[in-house]
Amino acid sequence: MIILANSLATPAIGTIFWTTFIFLILMIVLRVFAWKPILSAVKAREESIRSSLEAADEARKDMERLKADNEAIIDEARHERDILMKEARTAKDRLMAEARQQAKTEADKIIVKAREEIEREKRAALTQFREQVVSLSVSIAEKILRNKLSFDNQHEKLINDLLDEADLSKN
Amino acid sequence: MRDRGHYSFLWPAMIVIALALNTPINGSEVPPDRGHGQDAPRHQEEKPDETGFDATPFIMDHIGDSHEWHLFTTPDGKHVSIPLPVIVWTKERGLSIFSSAKLSHSHIHKGYMIPEEGELKGSIVMVDNDGIVIPDKFILDLSVTKTVTAMMVSALILIWLFVTMARSYARYGISPPKGIQGFLEPVVLFIRDDIALPNIGKQKYEQFMPYLLTVFFFILINNLMGLIPIAPGGANVTGNIAVTMVLALFTFFVTQISGNRNYWRHIFNTPGIPFWLKPIMIPVELIGLFSKPFALMVRLFANITAGHIIILSLVSLIFIFGSLVIAPVSVFLVLFMNLLEMLVAFIQAYVFTLLSALFIGLAVQEEH
């Protein structure tokens, strides 16, 4: 029994030789035809996954950047529009104020002119009236003086008639 | 250093072997059947007086090596075996290559013989013209034995598996793995990411990957093939001390060849200890150098051999008791042991690879 156990625990030269031979051949064959392609393929896959993830991350960042840019552009546009609107409003207000001012000055000028015209007209009328009154008075006086010399009682009548005449022409 | 504790593996295994071998089993009849037990109970019903069954030769025949591959025994006691090539060399007679069929049943061919009894049972001996054994002759026996054949079959299976896998990468590129590829890729990645990378380090692990992968799958496939009871399985390859010795020596040489200055300095001029301790430390470190592969060798051998012995002993119970009643118990226990041995097959392949990676890692690590 012990002998058998010994034979079990004694390495046989033939088995050592063949194991070395088979293992070496196996390692070389697998190294060339299996391990190298397998490990490089796995590595390539890992590399591609890593780069894909990085690319996706990059794309996401780009998108965010674009979005932020868009928002900035929109904000700017909105801001600009606000400014333009404000400017337009102020311009409108200013124009309206100017127009109003101008209209007012024009109107004032017209009024002043009109007033001056009225004044002048009035003055002319008064002058004319005064001249008429003078000429009338003179003619009345002339007639009175003439009638006095003829008919006393007719003075009063004549004056009234003349006055009536004068009133009518005046109106 | 870590594996020193594993010497304890040696002792349970040896005890199991010793128990299996020393258990006195009565009777000296040739076992009616060598392993294919289905016929055996019928045999014993036919010949109820021959209840004796010697489990030891039965077990030893199965876990040992052989010059032929025994397949089964017919009910009338004829052994059916595959003859294997015998390759022997002696100083006197030179190289002879012939089929082992010519040596079966103690036949003498070209002056060689395989005794079926005695101390030299199963090994090739030289005989003189009268058929008398010439003792103490050196015979270089390079025969392709059962173990070698099983190893070749395993190697071919591995090549087929992994070349197929590599081809599928070539075909499908870097797309997700399919089929065999999907089944084996996680294991390959496990060896890379959980064995090689943490133990050897990122810079140097790549050059050791082919060795670690090959040794892992070689041990694993042989462990698993050994659990299949029919040819080409059932050979005790990784339970053969020569095989485990060669594998351990591979790890040893890979470690020593890749060992850097720092590694050798740690052995011959261990830093951080008093100078007067250094002469004592050198032999300690040198013993450590050789104990590591020795532990690798014995651990794998003892684990796998012990597993085979236990399973075969449980099968033998049916014949020892000579009763069908014991068969269900035996079958249940064998089933349990088979499942356990499948686990052991993976664990031992893993442990061997892990420790190899660890030793290589210690040899290549830079000073820190």
Image: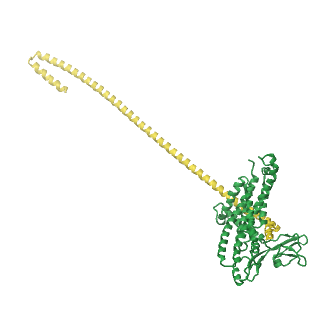
Chain colours: A yellow, B green
Q: Nearer the viewer, residue A72 or A125?
A: A72
Percent x, y of residue A144: 13, 17
Residue A165 vertical position relative to residue B357 in the rendered view, above or below? above
The image quadrant that residue A151 belongs to is top left
Residue B259 vertical position relative to residue B230 in the rendered view, above or below? above
Percent x, y of residue A26: 76, 65
Q: Is residue B222 visible?
A: no
Q: Residue furthest bottom?
A: B46
Q: Nearer the viewer, residue B327 or B266?
A: B327
Q: Is residue B24 visible?
A: yes
Quarter of the image with the N terminus of chain B is bottom right
The image quadrant that residue B165 belongs to is bottom right
Percent x, y of residue B151: 76, 68
Q: Nearer the viewer, residue B87 or B276?
A: B276
**A109 relative to B272 in the view: left or right:** left
Q: Residue at x 36, y 33 (%)?
A: A100
Q: Residue at x 81, y 68 (%)?
A: A12
Residue A157 vertical position relative to residue A81 in the rendered view, above or below? above
Q: Residue furthest left?
A: A153
Q: How many marks?
A: 0
The image quadrant that residue A96 belongs to is top left
Percent x, y of residue B164: 69, 66
Q: Nearer the viewer, residue B203 or A1?
A: A1
